[in-house]
Image (cartoon, rainbow, N blue to C red):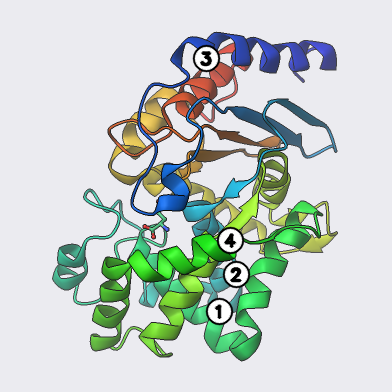
Amino acid sequence: MYGVRMEFEQILNDVVGDVRASLGKGSVANYIPALAIADPTKFAIAVATVDGGLYSAGDANDRFSIQSISKIFALSQAFAILGNDLWGRVSRENAGSELNSLLLLELGAGMPRNPLSNSGAIVTTDVILTENGKETKNVLLEFVKERSGNSEIGFNEEIAQLEVEHGHRTKALSYLLASFKNLENHPKTVAMLYFYQCAIEANCVDLAKSLLYLTNKGYCPISGRQVISASQARRINSILLTCGHYDVSGDFAFRVGLPGKSSVSGAITVVVPGKMAIAAWSPALNRDGVSLVALEALELFATKTGLSIF
Ligand code: GLU
């Protein structure tokens, strides 16, 4: 598919060399101290293929909090639980503004613009909470463990606590959703679970593996489970393409041409339907809140391999 495998490994090593000059540019997120101390010169990229191939380069064993990548997992679980009824509680349009806009939520009468915004992820978390009750925190973590096949994955308690302490706006979104009766559970509990899933710690290899179900018609080859239907996987990928990168999803589609999701910790995950999942990570963000080097690396990767959905 991509020539001999050695060639494929060579591409990742070339990417590491090519982005070296950009390491250290951009700024790490600083809304909580635990993210502000991240080393901006770190970089990793990992590729997991549907046929069991695994390739990585750079700091691929370094763990980081997955932050907004968790929104993909919450969306998948909520979609599996509610089916198309989910779309009665959250829309599928680009937010076109801040990730955590109270104004957009107010204008939408409590209907989040999409499941990858903070308000959207609070709704998907609420769906999971209604289904799983007291087990929810564990269910959220188990989902990532099972998809990645790594039972060592856990929460970073310090980050979780700091998110709870500093996440005033997210808590406000939760209460606003509740005021519009778009939460079935207490807004404080839902927000707390949202913060915990952001604080799940994993590395690029874990993340690439954990997204294979989205490349593979909803079937997770690692756990041997049909996580969501093929149709649901296709639809989630469309939301990743149109809404995965804050206000710059169009730019990401233009430069990389693949469904993906960015996060404030500097991780970007990408899905190549039918083929592979890719995770890249470097903590320093560009002005749009997207990892400067991970974006550059994914653009290079897509260009060198010719992989794009377009
Ligand atoms: N914990 C972050 C927040 O809620 C996640 C943001 C992100 O990764 O985009 O603001």
Q: Is residue 142 left or right of 182 when viewed as pictured?
A: right
Judge the density around disc 2: few (<14), some (14-19), many (≥20) Cα neighbours within 10 Å: many
Q: Are marks 3 and 4 in contact (CB under 8 Å)?
A: no
Three-letter code, disc 1 = Ile
Residue 19, numbered label:
3
Which residue sits at x=51%, y=33%?
A: 39
Measure the alpha-carbon separation of dots 1 and 3. 39 Å
Residue 166 in sight from this viewpoint: yes
Q: Nearer the viewer, mark 3 or mark 4?
A: 3
| Residue 137: x %, y % from top left | 61, 77
Depth check, front residue: 127 or 62: 62
Residue with the mark numbered 1: 128
Measure the alpha-carbon separation of dots 2 and 3. 35 Å
Judge the density around disc 3: few (<14), some (14-19), many (≥20) Cα neighbours within 10 Å: some
Measure the alpha-carbon separation of dots 3 and 4. 29 Å
Picture quarter with ligand 1: bottom left
Q: Is residue 249 left or right of 202 when viewed as pictured?
A: left
4 or 1: tag closer to the N-terminus: 4
Q: Is residue 195 above or below residue 271?
A: below
Judge the density around disc 1: few (<14), some (14-19), many (≥20) Cα neighbours within 10 Å: many
Residue 73, numbered label:
4
For residue 176, what is the image quadrant?
bottom left
Depth check, front residue: 83 or 124: 124
Q: Is residue 267 above or below residue 239?
A: above
Residue with the mark numbered 2: 77
Residue 111 in sight from this viewpoint: no
Q: Is residue 67 above or below residue 272?
A: below
Q: Are marks 4 and 1 in contact (CB under 8 Å)?
A: no
Q: Are marks 4 and 2 in contact (CB under 8 Å)?
A: yes
| Residue 125: x %, y % from top left | 49, 74
Tag count: 4
